[in-house]
Image: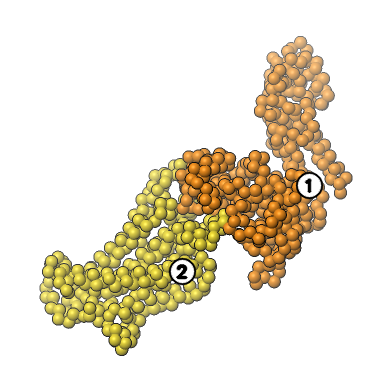
Chain colours: A yellow, B orange
Amino acid sequence: MGATLAQQAVPRDTGVFEFLLDPDRWTGSTGILASGADSVLLCAAVIVTSIVLAVPAATVLAHGRRLELTSAWVVNIGRAMPTFGVAGLLVPFSLRAGYGFEPWPIFIALTLLTVPPMYLSTYTAIRQVPAGAVDAARAVGYTERDVLLRVELPLALRVIGTGVRVAAVQVVATEPIRAFLGGDGLGRYVRDGLGQNNSNLVIAGAILIGLLAASTGLLFAGLEWLLMPAGVRRLGGARTGRVQSSDATILTTDDGDGEAAGGPPGLHVASEPAEAGASSGGVRGSP
Amino acid sequence: MSDESPPALRLKGVRKRFPGANQDAVQALDLAIPRGAIVSLIGPSGCGKTTTLRMINRLIEPTGGRIELEGTDVTDVDATELRRGIGYVIQQVGLFPHRTIGANIGTVPRALGWDKRRIAERTDELVDLVGLERDMLPRYPDQLSGGQQQRVGVARALAADPPVLLMDEPFGAVDPIVRGRLQDELLALQERVHKTIVLVTHDLDEALKLSDRIALLNVGGVLEQFASPDELLRAPASSFVERFIGGGRSMRRLGLTTLAAVTPHRGSVVSVDATPQQARAAMDEFRTDWVGLTDDDDRFLGWVARASVADGVALDTLERHEPAATVTPDDTLATALETIMNSRTLVAVVREGERFLGVVTLEQIHAELGALRDAGDAAA
């Protein structure tokens, strides 16, 4: 890797779509596909690393109700962390240690960006599991491990999934800054466009980055749906089962329950098709 | 329950101090809970009733003292094993929202490694026992009403047929009407399953209605009185107990006595085949202006006014009025009083199904209350 300095300038009169629809721009070592693969590879590495670092730790700590203050603290630090600054700061160290411009500085900076929100959403997800269910699980003789694996984790899965998805989208949307730190990836078109004073190229790059981020969101939403056990999938607002009971109060308490199971509303950043379908179903079902 | 058999559950000097607290939440509590009895723990907030309950299945570990379940110290048993042998019902029900009703009920049997057929059979049995429909089994908890969920909670607690059932304000989260029904169901259920039930409640009326014995705790887990509901009302052991029970002791005692326990009283009621003279004699005897008629099968036909009774006119040709107040022998004196007051009459007809058993009048209730009070004074 490393910036390809020998790239030819894109003529300024090339239109945005003319650029994007030209097959020659997609192929080759500096083509869109190669740059996209570069981005995807780095993002995947960051997301997987962040999940491994954040989710198990947050799950276990939240289960034991431990380090609550530390958790808030970590998250606040994370929020204040300037990713670009951190990456820039790491570059000289990386160079001195012989690791080059890429990919360690940007990898570390992006991981630092991702871990705190993932950690927070997982911690919150476990904590918002109905206390009664956890209490009852202990009372029927579940071991602590069973309480965590068979009650807390399944009931938190939805919110954890949302947290991972939001963080993943954030990684993909932030990753292009590597192009300004001696790297490539899809950010190169924005950088090159700025360098060549070619706004069409900047816009084309932005579109590509946006598409990748949006696809990431969709991909993770799909994964969530596939990996979720049936009993969990229907929770969190997705109420596929028709309310058959004669008791009409169920309909009135529906929203409240959905909220409780779906976690803090703030964490539902992207709205899912499943939710929309369910709420319209609810309207049909009410008398 | 017999006094000779050892108690199912015995607390000996049980103490709990939470970390960081400078006072015991429960200090030296002794309690013997008879087998097959419903015992309520009741008291003001901070009296340690829930703490005590949770120490029994070691959701909270006692700081000192001994808790014996069927003679065995609970701390000698593995907590997981212990809990599988004790049913537990909580206020928030605590059903697993991601599992079907069937899976919820089968939680403990599954943990115990029963085979699928046996679990399914047991689940069906329990659903019938707690009065739910079998077609609810594949549904999820949020598709049930609060009362139905609470029944599932009870079914789950009973799944492995534990001898002891702990209930922490089990009916606290449902509305009063459903609560009353669930209480009746619990009593009917207990008739069949004969569990040893320890119940935490803050509702005195619930404790009075459900319990064989009530343990009234003061702040810090001090046992103020451990007595039957009637004794608690009749002879409060301390001024604290008296204050806790508050006013309305007489009314509450009426609520503990069922009509079945009161001497039946035929009142001014005659057979429809009786003569007008006999009808008048009955009204005179009871100083009323109404006479009730029953048929050969002892069915109550209605009330007839004195003014319409005339010599030579058969009673069954007279205009009859449906009784405004009817009660059953299972109703309490308090219910009878309430029914009579609401009907704006002075008498309620006691019927079991179709069968006429007698009448209950305001005077009678008054007399019963006097008898209760006299018995109380004698005991005190």
Residue A279 drawn above or below residue B193? below
Q: Residues within 10 Å of mark 2 (few under 14, many from 20)?
A: many
Mark linked to residue A58: 2
Q: Nearer the viewer, residue B335 or A273?
A: A273
Numbered label tally: 2
Q: Which mark is residue B4?
A: 1
- Where in the figure is residue A185, as x and y percent of width and height? 24, 74
Under mark 1, the amino acid is: Glu
Horizontally, residue A1 falls left or right of residue B264, namely left
In the shown orientation, is residue A239 left or right of residue B262?
A: left
Chain of the residue that carries numbered disc 1 in the rendered image: B
Q: Is residue A176 above or below residue A280?
A: below
Q: Which chain letter matches label 2? A: A
Which quadrant of the rendered structure holds the C terminus of chain A? top left
Q: Residue at x 52, y 39 (%)?
A: B133
Say if residue A258 shows up in the picture.
Answer: yes
Q: Residue at x 69, y 59 (%)?
A: B73
Q: What secondary structure is marked by label 2?
A: helix
Would you say the residues marked 2 and 1 are in contact, meaning their CB atoms lie under 8 Å apart?
no
Q: In x, y percent, where is residue B223?
A: 76, 58
Q: Residue furthest bottom?
A: A96
Q: Position of residue B296 (x, y in %)?
A: 71, 17
**Quarter of the figure with residue B129:** top right
Q: What residue is rendered at 66% in x and 25% in y?
A: B354
Q: Residue at x 34, y 67 (%)?
A: A168
Q: Quadrant of the N terminus of chain A?
A: bottom left
In 3D space, how far apart are the residues under numbered discs 2 and 1 (Cα atoms)?
54 Å
